[in-house]
Amino acid sequence: MNIHSVVSAKAPKIMTPERGDKREAILDAALGLFADRGYHGTTMPEVAERAEVGAGTVYRYFASKEALVNDLFRLWKAQLGAALMSDFPVAAPPRQQFHELWRRLCSFAKRHGRALEFLEMHHHGDYLDDASRAVEKDMMVPLKAFIEDAQRKEALKAIQPEILGALVYGGFMALVQAQKKHLLSLSTEVLDDAEQCLWEAVRR
């Protein structure tokens, strides 16, 4: 699949709640709780308390905890996909494209660290529904197209694209976890060094 056709395709509109409304307050509260305690360690009354709304209000917007976590997952997975691929430089050389993806991933982690933690913790959850898994699959389409396009140009190793993607994303998330544990600080120098190491790992 050609990256030009994939990235140029019209992306679905991402629906986000209006600032200051109760639904947004519930989603924000749930994000923090799910990221801290996981799905099974979070209760709807706790979400209501943190959101400063009544328990009945939470159920007015979300029929169940499962519905809430799925709405939240779809929202942030779509936001991550848009952050990575919107206005992507499809004509740039593969190394420059790799740098742009890395830069955007770092920027997303800096601005939405809690959301990234949430996505990492929950993307294998058995409570995710078909719609959430479809969003996950759709997000991977342009990323896979980037890898396959770079492989055709003999810039990346000729192995399964999912392996290359997992190496880079997994390496990045390991850095995020190391910073969370105060094992290192993700300075510009550290991120630049990590980018170069990961590029060397996947380049042909």
Image (cartoon, rainbow, N blue to C red):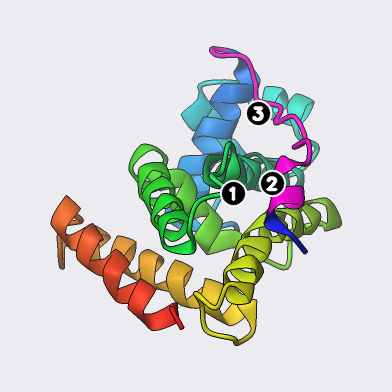
Q: Tell me the amino acid under the disc marked 3.
A: Ala
Q: Main secondary structure of the magenta part?
A: loop
| Residue at horizontal 69 percent and vertical 56 percent from the top | 3
> Is disc 3 placed on a helix, strand or loop?
helix
Residue 190 located within the stretch drawn in magenta:
no
Tell me which residue sits at (65%, 25%) in the image.
16
What is the distance, in whole Å, between disc 3 and disc 1 at their CAs? 47 Å
Cβ atoms under marks 1 and 2 closer than 8 Å: yes
- Name the residue at the bottom extreme: 159
Compared across the picture, whether 12 is left or right of 184 comes to: right
The answer to whether one can see residue 7 in this image is yes
The residue to which callout 3 is attached is 55
In terms of sequence position, does the residue under pointer 2 or pointer 3 come before the other?
A: 2
| Residue on which the image places disc 1 | 90
**Residue named by callout 2:** 7
Q: Secondary structure at mark 1?
A: loop
Query: Residue 200 location, x and y as percent?
Result: 34, 79
- Residue 29 lies, with reference to residue 77, above or below; the image says above
Q: CA distance from mark 1 to mark 2?
A: 8 Å
Residue 12 part of the magenta-drawn span: yes
* Frontmost residue, 87 versus 179: 87
Label 2: which secondary element: helix
Start and end of the magenta stretch? 4-20
Asked which quadrant contains residue 80, the reply is top right
Q: Indicate the position of residue 148 as horizontal and vertical percent values.
A: 65, 71
Q: Residue 179 in the image: x percent, y percent?
A: 23, 60
